[in-house]
Amino acid sequence: MTLSEEDYLKAIFHLSRDKEEQVATNAIAGRMETKASSVTDMLKKLSEKGLVTYKKYQGAALTAKGRLLAARIVRRHRLWEVFLVEKLQFPWDEVHDIAEELEHIKSEKLIEKLDDYLDHPRFDPHGDPIPDKDGVIKSMEKVPIASAMEGDTGLVVGVKNSSSEFLQYLDKMKIALGQEIRIVRREPFDNSVEIQTQGRKFNISAMTANNIYLKII
Amino acid sequence: MTLSEEDYLKAIFHLSRDKEEQVATNAIAGRMETKASSVTDMLKKLSEKGLVTYKKYQGAALTAKGRLLAARIVRRHRLWEVFLVEKLQFPWDEVHDIAEELEHIKSEKLIEKLDDYLDHPRFDPHGDPIPDKDGVIKSMEKVPIASAMEGDTGLVVGVKNSSSEFLQYLDKMKIALGQEIRIVRREPFDNSVEIQTQGRKFNISAMTANNIYLKII
DNA sequence: ACTTATTTTTAGGCAAATCTAAAAATTTGT
DNA sequence: ACAAATTTTTAGATTTGCCTAAAAATAAGT
Ligand SMILES: [Mn+2]
Ligand SMILES: [Mn+2]
Ligand SMILES: [Mn+2]
Ligand SMILES: [Mn+2]
């Protein structure tokens, strides 16, 4: 498996998630920041290798084999992210790009030793679940703040958007994983949400509320 | 810089070491396990980029810029080796190939944080010195057992040959870095050497004696 | 239904890194 | 010194991953 094949598999994996649907050529191109024609080429190759099913004009879907490989790449990515944050003290908004490279290092043993060393973490620094070595993902029940009820209290367990900009914005607002947040009121006019956390009470936009996941307690 | 360019620079670096000489095309091809014609192509490219000086049929040498880049790659390689052995508990004979990939991860900050985390190690698990971030190498005074005097006592500070086979053979003989060894006698017939260490007294071949470095104490 | 817009595929090309085989330069041996 | 051996370079192909532009298929709008 080449680096590029791995990145395509991962892209298809993220685009299909749970849903069993076919993924459109253009969707893959968008995510990979490449052209549709390049995607077509790659889908043919991955299909030859039995990692995706592909029929002209019908999009592609991972086979069981492809899904397993993709999940393993995600596992590597997220374990390295944990390493970078927990051990090397990187801020959570800087680890994605480095993990994007580290995930391609080829050594089963390396990843299992890393997993031991990190004490078998179940979530990455953004709250995303880490697949086990058989590709099984145990995800957690969680709701975006935007969908939580007024009066609910929850722990921040993840973010939907892991962009550097959003993560830095959360840092600025002093909102971090594990923190307790209470939904004070939802403003119907613009869907902004008033929240209370750490003795502070303030408003967040609908967009922000949509990108923070809570586990209601 | 591509992965391949980095590996070529490193090969030339190791082949020239201290000596300022030109490195032959074939020497590079041998070390890189590639063909001479591929080397010629790459030397032209590296020369265009100002990383090596190259004249047809005259071999190549690193420029100051090329040497600095090469030393930085070696720094990354050796720091990752330390990480793999010290933190992940890899045996010293398994780390080279993994470091061969890790050395290409592109992030200055990553390497400086790794260096901090490892507490600024000065030598890798095979006793080779780790260049500082400006490419400066402080090496240590050391002699192969084969050149030590009868009666000398020294600490094992490095190995010349870092192949898995040799390192495993040292493990089997229970010879490790940091260990104290006394040269009992050199056999003129076959240049084998009788050594004493940890209460044991035994013979090692000339070849083995040539590949273990001591710091005489 | 049929015309238009969008998506996807094909065709043809390019750059990087490699290879083989042949040609050119250098080195070695007598 | 000069023929033979060796080393190095060139020429021409191949593979991978990507691109643009044009053609083909599908989806949308009226
Ligand atoms: Mn990647
Ligand atoms: Mn993540
Ligand atoms: Mn390498
Ligand atoms: Mn080493």
Image (tube, coloured by chain):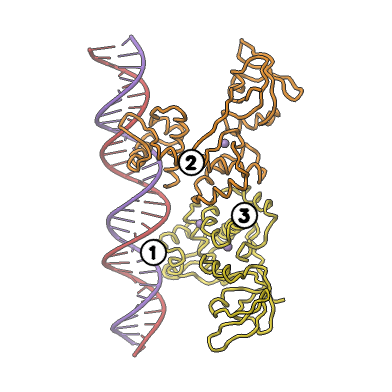
Chain colours: A orange, B yellow, C red, D purple
Chain where mark 1 sits: B
Mark toward the viewer: 2 or 3: 2
Q: Nearer the viewer, residue A34 or A7?
A: A7
Amino acid under label 3?
Phe
Amino acid bearing label 1? Lys
Quadrant of the frame with the C terminus of chain B: bottom right
Expressed as whole percent of the image width and height from the top left, the position of residue A163 reads 58, 32
Question: Mark 3 — residue?
Answer: B83
Where on the picture, by quarter, is residue A201?
A: top right
Vertical order, D23 against C5 (above or below): below
Disc 1 to disc 2, C-alpha distance: 40 Å
Q: Which residue has dot 2 on it?
A: A134
Mark 3 residue element: helix
Mark yes or no: residue A169 visible. yes
Percent position (x, y) of residue A93?
62, 36
Chain of the residue under label 3: B
Q: Name the residue tied to disc 1.
A: B35
